[in-house]
Amino acid sequence: MGNAQEDLQLSHWWVSPGERASIAVLQRYLDRQQLTWQEHAIPGSGTARYADVLRQAIASGNAPTASQVIGHDIHEWAALGLLQDLTPIAEEQEWDEIIPVGIQQLSKYRGRWVAAPINAHATNWLWVNAAALERIGGQPPDTWTDLLELLERAKAAGIIPLAIGGEAWEHTLLFESVAVGAGGAEFYRKAFIEMRPQEIDPALLELIFQRMSTLRDYLDPDFTRRNWNQSTDLMRTGKALLQLQGTWVAGELTLQGLLPGRDYQCFHFPDTQGVYLFNSDQYMLFKDAPGSPQQRRELLTILLDRDFQRELNLTTGAAPARVDVPRESFNACGQALISGMRQANLRRTMLGSIGMGNANPPHVKNAIYQVVSQHLRGRLEDAEAARQLYQAIVDFNSTPN
């Protein structure tokens, strides 16, 4: 750990226009505390590419003070013994009391805090072009049947019913919402978080892939050649009716000056009401890196500060990680999100997103990516996809962890 006052080195992947607005909030709070810092913006949110660049920096003796991180990647880094133990500060600031239990399970390694959570995105949300919805006389879909009826209306009107991009993580976000909708929260927990193959009904797994095949019929042929924010643009401009995507979409829409209710609507994927599939952005601090103990304390205090988390997440579209941040300054989607997170935390239905690596270790996530994406592209039959996914969970349980 550094001793003298040095510039803090912060690595992150927030590079889109909406995400740059979030970094500007962090800059303002650091400036206020007279903490000087250098940022290392590395495209590739939570991906192997980002981790590779970070590993190279560490190997060359240039570990950053802090790095953005999500999900089970936290445990992978902690297992290497590289991370600062944040428990003394966490206990002093009562993080156990203000952070949802589901997030804590990722922020802690062997009972010790090793990451500081700053938000909680939800991934089981539909984003809807308000004008297109009105044009086709559609209603927010509460059930799977409602959704199919809505998609049919869009198709008949010549609108892309469901916009999605070509990356496996996006396909897996769709899969996880379909899985919760078909099987419920307890099924999802047992199958994809606890990974207990004996609790998985093969027929239910096949039903999920059958539903994914049904949704494939409502995608446009060019979906494999787009990224997620290009799909958001299709929804935003009314060329597509719906997009299933994380709440970071709200950050991009806010930047464009769009308002919920007027320009777009947001609601849960059908049959997932009451469940909060989450992706939490967090920061881990490296031991052998710039920054005195006092600078690190001040950085962590900022990251968990209630006002900082409110201002930051007005730009990100996420709920603050703290459960005690007032909702009033958030828009309608943000207020619904925060209420949903609090309720799901109490009901223990706040569950990690598979697609964003908050449900299972990277090698399991990658195996699921492969199956789900190949299936959505029409390269695997429903039954074969279900078999391969089941096998990935069996393999995890037969491998020493």
Image: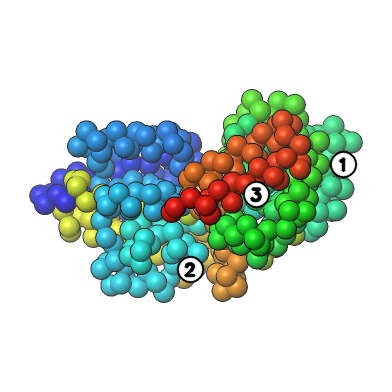
Dot 2: element: helix
Marks 3 and 1, how far apart in space?
Answer: 31 Å
Q: How many marks?
A: 3
Kind of residue at badge 3:
Tyr
Q: Position of residue 145 (x, y in %)?
A: 85, 53
Residue shown at 81% from the left, 54% from the top? 144
Q: In the rendered image of this protein, does residue 156 appear above or below residue 310? A: above
- What mark, if any, has residue 390 been given in the picture? 3
Q: Name the residue carrying label 1.
A: 152
Q: State which tag comes first along the sequence, 2 or 3.
A: 2
- What mark, if any, has residue 101 been given in the picture? 2
Q: Position of residue 245 (x, y in %)?
A: 63, 45
Kind of residue at badge 1:
Glu
Judged by depth in the image, the label closer to the viewer, 3 or 1, is 3
Residue shown at 62% from the left, 47% from the top? 391
Front one among 136 and 396: 396
Front one among 222 and 110: 110
Q: In the rendered image of this protein, does residue 331 appear above or below residue 148? A: below
Residue shown at 28% from the left, 62% from the top? 86
Front one among 193 and 281: 193
Judged by depth in the image, the label closer to the viewer, 2 or 3, is 3
Mark 2 is surrounded, within 10 Å at the Cα level, by few (under 14), some (14 to 19) or many (20 or more) other residues, namely some
Marks 2 and 3, how far apart in space?
Answer: 27 Å
Q: Where is residue 390 in the image (x, y as percent from the top left)?
A: 65, 49
Q: In the rendered image of this protein, does residue 40 appear above or below residue 205? A: above
Name the image quarter holding the C terminus.
Answer: bottom left
Q: Do the residues labelled 2 and 3 touch (CB within 8 Å)?
A: no
Q: Where is residue 348 in the image (x, y as percent from the top left)?
A: 57, 70
- What mark, if any, has residue 42 been given in the picture? none
Q: State which tag comes first along the sequence, 2 or 1.
A: 2
